[in-house]
Image (spheres, rainbow, N blue to C red):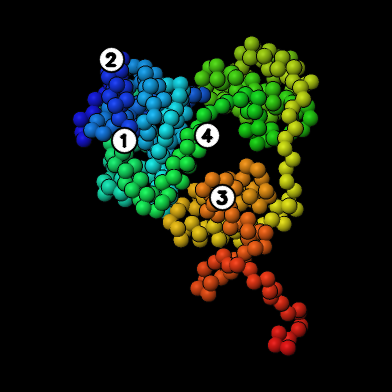
Amino acid sequence: MTDYPLLTKPAEVEELVATLLEHDYYAVDTEFHRERTYYPRLALVQIAWPGGLALIDPLAVDIAPLEAVLRSEAVAVMHASSQDLEVLERACGTIPTVLFDTQVAAGFVGMRSPSLASLHDQLLGIRLPKGDRLTDWLQRPLEDRQLAYAAGDVEHLLEIADSLRGRLVEKNRLQWAEDECELVRARSTVIRDPDGAWRRIKEARSLRGSAQNAAWAIAAWRERRAMKLDQPPRYILSDLAVVAMAQRPPKNEDGFHRIRGLDERHLKADDRSEIVAALAAARDVELPVPAPTRSRETDRDMRPAVTLVAAWLAQFASDRNIDPALIGSRSDIEELLRGGDDARLGSGWRQRLVGEPISRLVDGNVAIAFDGNGRLALEERSGRPFIVPEDGANADS
């Protein structure tokens, strides 16, 4: 397929929406920039459906009518979808009702976080043209090579999805993949809470008392200012300036002099006044008490069990041709062993596949042993302890 129109008029988008609503699935991808803005700036939308492909120029036409397609029961096929979902939600006010992420699905047939290019190569024998990773998608007019590269992201995506579905059905894992795609879709909604911005600053998290309150107030002000101006927070104030100001809060406009990491040229008089007011209001605020952190001693006690389970889990995933990262991380194992209510390995297909065996292992009902060929195996426990000779004792006696 080489004939793909670039839509720039409302009527063209409306016609595309009508076409897409006639199908049960479609492929979608986006190109965007966010280096100099708070919110991602959408530059191009690529959509394919059985027998067709179109590009939409969001700088020329509103893509909000795509909301009807996203809210329909049609399956949106995407690759590594998390950032694209955020972009679509901002542009259309919603995300797809049903998602099939080819990167996620590929993990259930043994491909480890594959790129879109590798899926084309391995599943279809197609080499995608190399593109400029740093191309300026906001330039106009877009060059033919840019349009061709962008179209390639969705041109064969439905074929890739069909191939992956076939393999998943053969392995009886389609439901696992669909469940995981739904988790990705559900987690995609970005909720920006300015009051939690200070926790994203590493040095601020170690502050205590009034300095912590000050960091909360300054970081929240910075976040709201960044949202209003659509600029990255670091353009408003550096992290270093937030922490330095929290440790030495200015009480008036003169107090902003010689604060480390602060370029006063970027702060107008109104900005300085707002920060001083926010700091004054924050003095009597009682911040939520963070959940108690586990002690290092607890971690140390758990380490042997976690290491043993992690080794078995990696081999288990390899034997079954599943990306180990899809099953769970070391922190997921720790959370399960801790008995956490929200343990990732304690629900859904993960619980049935590995959560139950791990729970039986730590309860002492099964054991991990080497099978004689250097591989780990889960075995029913005999209950007969192996006696290790004491130091200096004759092992044969």
Measured in 3D between alpha carbons, the distance from the residue under mark 1 to the one under mark 2, in whole angstroms, is 23 Å
Q: Nearer the viewer, mark 4 or mark 1?
A: 4
Measured in 3D between alpha carbons, the distance from the residue under mark 3 to the one under mark 4, in whole angstroms, is 20 Å
Amino acid carrying label 4: it is: Arg
Q: Which residue is mark 2?
A: 11
Q: Which residue is mark 4?
A: 187
Q: Nearer the viewer, mark 3 or mark 4?
A: 3
Amino acid carrying label 1: it is: Val
Badge 1: residue crowd in 10 Å (few <14, some 14–19, many ≥20): many
Q: Earlier in the sequence, mark 3 or mark 1?
A: 1
Q: x, y percentage for residue 219?
A: 65, 25
Measured in 3D between alpha carbons, the distance from the residue under mark 3 to the one under mark 1, in whole angstroms, is 34 Å
Label 3–label 4 contact, CB within 8 A: no
Q: Which mark is residue 262?
A: none
Amino acid carrying label 2: it is: Ala
Q: Which residue is mark 3?
A: 351
